[in-house]
Image: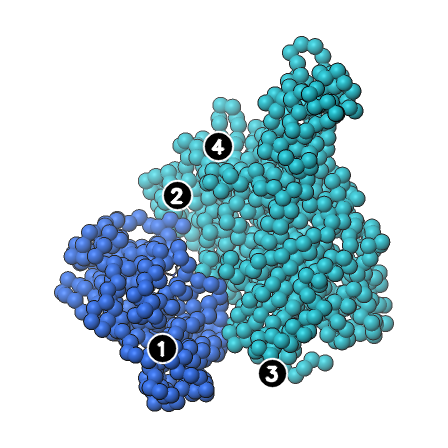
Chain colours: A blue, B cyan
Amino acid sequence: MKPAPFRYVAPRSVDETLALLAEHGAEGKILAGGQSLVPLLNMRLARPQVIVDINGIRSLAYIRRKDDHLHVGALTRQRAVEESATVRRQVPLLWEAIRFVGHPQIRTRGTVGGSLAHADPSAELPAVAAALDAELVVRSPSGERALSPGEFFAGYLTTALEPTDLLTEIRFPLLPERTGTAFVEVARRHGDFALVGVAAVVRRSDGTIAEARLAFTGVGPGPVRARGAEGRLAGSAGTSRVFADAAREAAARLDPESEIHATAQYRRDVAATLARRALELAWQRSGGRTR
Amino acid sequence: MPTRWFGERIPRNEDPRLLTGRGMYVDDVRRPGTLHAAFYRSPHAHARILRIATDQAKALPGVVAVVTAQDLPERIRGPLPKLIPHPALVHHKTQVALAGEVVRHVGEPIALVVAESRYIAEDALELIDVEFEVLPAAVDLEAAAKPGAPRVHADMADNIAAHHIQRAGNVEEAFAKAPHVFRERFTMDRGSSSPIETRGVVAEWDPRSHQLTVWDSTQAPIRIRNYLSDLLGLPQANVRVIAPDIGGGFGPKIMMCYPEEISIPWAAMMLERPVKWIEDRREHFVATNHERLQIHDAEIAVDTDGRILGVRTTYLHDCGAYCAYGLTVPIVSGTTLPGPYKIPNYHAEYRAVFANKTQTSPYRGAGRPHGVFVMERLMDRVARELGIDRAEVRRRNFIQPHEFPYDLGGLIYQDGVRLVYDSGNYPEVFRKTMDHIGYADWAAQKARYRREGRRVGLGFAFYVEGTGIGPYEGCRITVEPSGKVYVATSVGTQGQGHYTSFAQIVADALGTDVRDVIVTTGDSGAFGWGTGTFASRAAVVAGNAVALAAGAVRQKTLQVAATLLEARGDDLELAEGKVFVRGVPGRAVMLGQVAAAANPLRGVIPQEWEGPGLEATRYFAPPSGAFAAGCHAALVEVDTETGLIRFLRYVVVHDCGPVINPMILEGQVRGGVAQGIGNAFYEKLVYDEQGQLLTQTFMDYLLPTVAEVPPVEVDHVETPSPLNPLGIKGAGEAGVIPVPALVASALDDALSEEGVRITEMPLSPSRLREILREAQTAPTPA
Ligand SMILES: Cc1cc2nc3c(=O)[nH]c(=O)nc-3n(C[C@H](O)[C@H](O)[C@H](O)COP(=O)(O)OP(=O)(O)OC[C@H]3O[C@@H](n4cnc5c(N)ncnc54)[C@H](O)[C@@H]3O)c2cc1C
């Protein structure tokens, strides 16, 4: 399990990185935390000619509040997010979800941008980005653009990123008052990719659900927003019954695949269970009482 | 310093070295000028090799050699040795060093590349071009056993390697007359023992001294030495095989010989340069032996009180593509199944079946988990059907302490010896376990959980484990003038703590500090006779050889010291590294002085001595195995909505006779439990219909971690074995054996409302939900 030969470059700035990416095009590959890329290299499933190691670019690692968003640099280690009091306070959903990513050792190397760019169909962070309507900021030689999750995630292990693009920042909108969030998942073992994971956001207005968002991971080629169920939840009373019905409806529309760890039916059933649990938890956290 | 080291919970001699990264594993062996090897392995489960083109690979800069079957000398081109022949094993097929005509499983080596680095070697693999004619593959065990299935070996009429029956009493009559008979089918699927250290071989040939040195992560270095000597045509004295520190063995590292164990030493000789091959994890999944897949049809006949009248099991054993090791696993299953119960009539019959998958051989437990699963599941079934408490059903059938030695009525164990349990106290082990887990008021506790909306089950399983079989092991002990004691044994060690437990035995006999006893294991250059570490036998067989050798050195010590101290041997004592006259501690000599005096420059040594110095060599050859026993119990919580399980408590009561070092023993047991939990809920090797292994990384083959394995409470019962001087029994496999049976029993209990009956292992959350659904929709079985 040794990688095929490659050239290694370690740019010191974003501009230098963009120039290198432009130079090497499809032959080049960005190396961030390496937690997904290095296994692929070693198994020779990825064989780039040039590795562009961005770990030396300090300016890409930060957690910063700016107006009504939390800005997270793409190279920010997952561990730093987990240890950040700001994240915990301002974007609790991200904080809750990131602790499901592998183990501390992996999170110490793995980056927020790397996880999103890799777009594993069972990864937690894409679902979080989807549920929060985060903005993904991409730089390319022709400039900067901000993509919505819907634009960014393009399918199984695929994103809108071109070989010449660098994901630089993720902007998480801060949530209004009386909004609760929850991330729940089922994995084979602690630290494994999710068999099914659900991110829920619920904004409350007294006993009523003002707005709800639900995003799944592990049940499709990428993160799946349950827009239909969300629409039905908005304006409904926050009762167990309502949450259960919405969860079932959301799960019924999923089209997961069977593979060695779980059947499609398992994933659909558990998606319903977890969606219900996530909605109830988010509701409670918004200050609502469950009836 | 304790007065007796045996039985003390002392830290291990080897830990400072291992924990500070100073272990010496095969990959740590660095010889100047070393070349690195990689193997081109079959991508197909079954194919004919039409053409192999290696020119491009040979031309890659840095490549030193590319070897295929036709380059091998005649004597290592054919099938490799058969390990344990058996009259029932009619088709004892074995693997070849490099496949030249047909490949029979994914991962079978076809070409060997030797290069200046492993990177270059792997680059060269991509340049090898093999043309295959893909043949139909036999994959599924049941399908492979049927007539007309694709044949793994063209010279056989079918895939049946062996058909073997063992019987005691008259089963037909017992079943015909029995008031109740219950039938079930049980399946256990394939697993990999997954040692942290994969396999590896480093070989170095010295053309001047004609000396071949091989570092091999094997559990049986002496046997590898013998086979290499034979296959390479070298005197045994010119081959030295060293099994240095081994990062886990668990059985599959005893194979004599894996293809790489012969091709790498041969390459080192041919190239006259050291060659290193370290198996990577992906190779390990396809190239190191698997185990566990067996399908048992079983039935039990009982009277109205739940007393066993007879048991019958017919099963299929999955060999994989070859059967080099022999029939140990299915034999052990059949002979472990009766366990602690009196079964007057018994019939065990199996067919060992070839399939186009990686070969199988014993892996920690080695058929015992299957036997225990079948028997304990049947006992739970009897209890449920007859409405008798499941603990009570067992009590009614236990072999009683006064009934030992207990003859199982003519069954033959894996060592070829009639199966007779030497000693045991099953009711006591069981009582202790039930007390620890709180079985007496379980019903009330379970109801309390239920009221909280929680589904918790109590499971338990009992097992008897054959350990410590022959033929023999040996040991040489030498006291040097420094006073340090050097012990060389023939067995290899893979983390079991032999550097400490053997030292404890010696320190007691010679009155030294245990840290002054330095143990060498697994080096044919240090001790040349032995069999290996398997079948929970090292402590029993080598441990007793150590005790005998230590006793002999002690006698010599007393004799020499008596002269030095002008006292009678009977009046001397050994303690604190000294020999002194009892009651007169001032009249003493250091053990080292005695050692010097035993090897004088002038004068005489006693004629009757086997040799000079404070040195002795002894062998121990037990007449038959010593039978350990134990019971595990646990509380398991199930989330029925997600199918996840969680252990709330886990209790083990274990009887392996007198315990040398409880800490080491408990570590062994806990490690085994972890492995058993893997077998029950996480670890499963999955093949597709073409014989491709879908689980080739630890992302897909799931080992339980600290997060999944609960704390394990361990307690002991000590029933000595009459078969060896120390009275000890083996414990290496104990932890793993009953876990699948226990998990099944706990799940049955937790899901009793749905009428769930677990009959297969391993499970998964997805599978468990499926079983729940099936139970809810199925009509209740008659
Ligand atoms: C044992 C183990 C368990 C794991 N468990 C989980 C889990 O439970 N959940 C989970 O989500 N993940 C898990 N992971 C994956 C881990 O989270 C990775 O960190 C993550 O998927 C990739 O992040 P990285 O920084 O390591 O990226 P890398 O591996 O360096 O890169 C991944 C991909 O993203 C690209 N890339 C990286 N950064 C950028 C960028 N800024 N712009 C453009 N492209 C970029 C790379 O070119 C590459 O294609 C696990 C990994 C391991 C080893």
Mark 2 lies on residue:
B118
Residue B207 position, x and y percent, is 48, 26
What residue is drawn where x is 50% and y is 47%?
B197
Q: What residue sits 28% from the left and 78% below the top? A: A176
Distance from label 3 to label 4 (Cα)?
Answer: 64 Å
Judged from the image, the secondary structure of the residue bearing numbered disc 3 is helix
Residue placed under numbered mark 3 in the picture: B777
Q: Confirm or deny contact between disc 3 and disc 4 (CB under 8 A).
A: no
Whether residue B279 sits left or right of residue B734 in the image: it is left
Picture disc at residue A212: none
Q: Residues within 10 Å of mark 4 (few under 14, many from 20)?
A: many
In whole angstroms, how far apart are the C-alphas of marks 1 and 3?
Answer: 38 Å
SS state under label 4: strand
Report the Cα–Cα distance between label 1 and label 2. Answer: 53 Å
Residue situated in front as seen by the camera: A57 or B96? A57
Task: Identify the residue under disc 4.
Answer: B204
